[in-house]
Image (cartoon, rainbow, N blue to C red):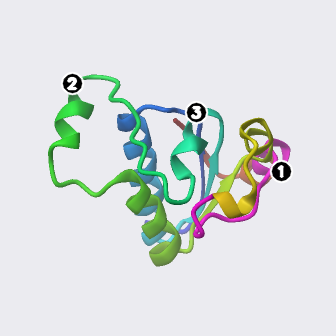
Amino acid sequence: MASRSVAVLVVTGFHERLQMAGMVASVAAVSGSDVTVFLSMNALQYFVRGSNREPPAEGSFGATMAKTNVPAFRQLFEQAVTLGGARVQPCSMAMDVLKLEPGDLEDWLGEPLGLTRFLADAFEGTLVTF
């Protein structure tokens, strides 16, 4: 895969969509793309440090997937960071709404970011939304 910029906007609270977003981020990152993930709204709650809260399945595939041996979506996002150099950044507005501090989130997440900056950085690349 040629090097390019991939921006992944994640606002969902459903397991299947979080899983696919993690897969896109990790595959793009380890394939050499410059990846930035923006976690906001319903997605951010699943990246609180030490939380084992699991998102609900949207359909039957999500329920089936939960019983298999596929890598967890959190693991996929972390691998995108550690193996591919991706940046996974929490939305500063969502953090304010949820009353979260940077130390409340997984340690492999980057600094909080505003939507304006995320979109400006993503402007010339591919934007994928979940």
Q: Amino acid at mark 3?
A: Asn
- Pick whichever, 96 or 41, lies toward us: 96
Tell me the quadrant of the picture where the N terminus can be found: bottom left
Q: Is residue 35 left or right of residue 1?
A: right
The disc placed on residue 42 is 3
Q: CA distance from mark 3 to mark 2?
A: 20 Å
How many angstroms separate mark 1 from mark 2 (CA)? Answer: 36 Å
Residue situated in front as seen by the camera: 9 or 48? 48
Label 1: how many residues lie within 10 Å, few (<14), some (14-19) or many (20+)?
few
Whole-percent x and y of residue 77? Answer: 47, 59
Q: Amino acid at mark 1?
A: Arg
Q: Is residue 94 left or right of residue 49?
A: right
**Image quarter of residue 36:** bottom right
Q: Label 2, on which residue?
A: 60
Residue 109 relative to residue 1: left or right:
right
How would you classify the magenta stretch by its main secondary structure? loop
Q: Which kind of residue does numbered mark 2 sit on? A: Ser
Q: Which residues are magenta?
A: 105-119
Q: Which residue position is annotated with label 1?
A: 117
Residue 67 is situated, as x and y percent measured from the top left of the image, at 16, 43
Report the front residue among 46 and 36.
46
> Does dot 1 land on a helix, a strand or a loop?
helix
User: Measuring 58% from the left and 69% from the top, which residue is drawn there?
Assistant: 108
